[in-house]
Amino acid sequence: MSKKCPQRRARTKQKRLSPDDRRKEFVTKATEFFADEGFGGGTRALARRLGVTQPLLYRYFPSKDDLIKEVYRTVYLEPFDTGWEKLLADRSRPIRERLQEFYNAYTNVIFTRKWLRIYLYSGLKGLDINRWYVGVVRDKILSRIIRECRHDAGLPSEIRPTAAEIEMAWVFHSGIFYYGVRKYIYDSPVLEDKEQMIADAVGAFLAGFAQVFGAASVGRAPVKEVV
């Protein structure tokens, strides 16, 4: 029996990780922790979840704020490096096709319990994550969509989006987002064909944009621009 114990301990011994790998592991597990507990959970409880001491956690992230910012960067900003902006701006393809492909890819990233719970928790907690992310969505997605819709409608595409255009784009974008909330947070019945939902939403948005800001805007007083 004395010979077997060391073998059992060897099998359960934690693998040594490089500092970079350890940092990534901390961020991954911290993301799961915040998704489960919200941002009210302390670093002591987080360290227990990680199976490390609190001082070791602080060696990698001097404050809880630093860790939250890294979770935000990893979960919310890194996906924007996948070429989404280039996809939306590719005028060699029909605008409807681009929007459908973008939202199919975008929802594949955000439609998870973890992503949505962190986003909603941070909003309830009043953290900057939501404000940062709303700004990124507005500047990198919605403004680009408006420019492409303007170009498709034969309108000037390089001027700044108007407040009314931004609001219409938010209504469209938020409707798709809330589909994920209903399915993954509320467990509510939804149309299971996500691609059909997106195709329908894109069709309705494009028709509405053309109706409101296309031919119907000729001769109408200018709408205030977003500052």
Image (cartoon, rainbow, N blue to C red):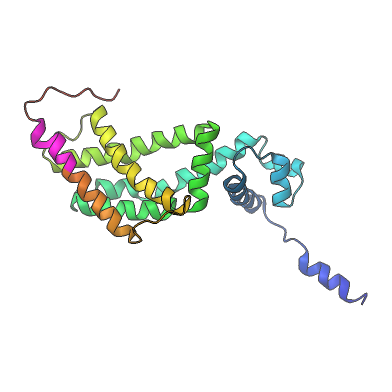
What residue span does the magenta drawing correspond to? 208-217
Farthest residue in the front direction? 189
In the image, is residue 14 above or below residue 41?
below
The answer to whether residue 161 shows anywhere in this view is no
Q: Residue furthest right?
A: 2
What is the total number of numbered labels drawn onto the structure image? Answer: 0
Above-or-below relation of 114 to 227: below
Q: Where is residue 33 in the image (x, y as percent from the top left)?
A: 62, 48
Which residue is pictured at 51% across the width and 31% down the height? 128
Q: Which of 21 and 58 is in front in this view?
A: 58
Q: Quadrant of residue 191?
A: bottom left
Quick check: is 215 in the magenta stretch? Answer: yes
Residue 62 appears at what percent x and percent y? 68, 35
User: From the image, which quarter does the C terminus lie in?
Assistant: top left
Is residue 142 rendered to the left or right of residue 65? left
Which residue is depicted at the point 8% across and 36% down?
Answer: 215
Q: Main secondary structure of the magenta part?
A: helix
Residue placed at 75% from the left, 42% from the top? 54
Quarter of the figure with the N terminus: bottom right
Residue 167: percent from left, percent from top = 28, 33
Residue 144 placement: quadrant: top left
Q: Residue at x 69, y 45 (%)?
A: 46
| 62 magenta-colored | no
Task: Name the spot of residue 77 as percent of width and height, x first.
Answer: 45, 43
In the image: residue 158, left or right of residue 51 = left
Can see residue 164? yes
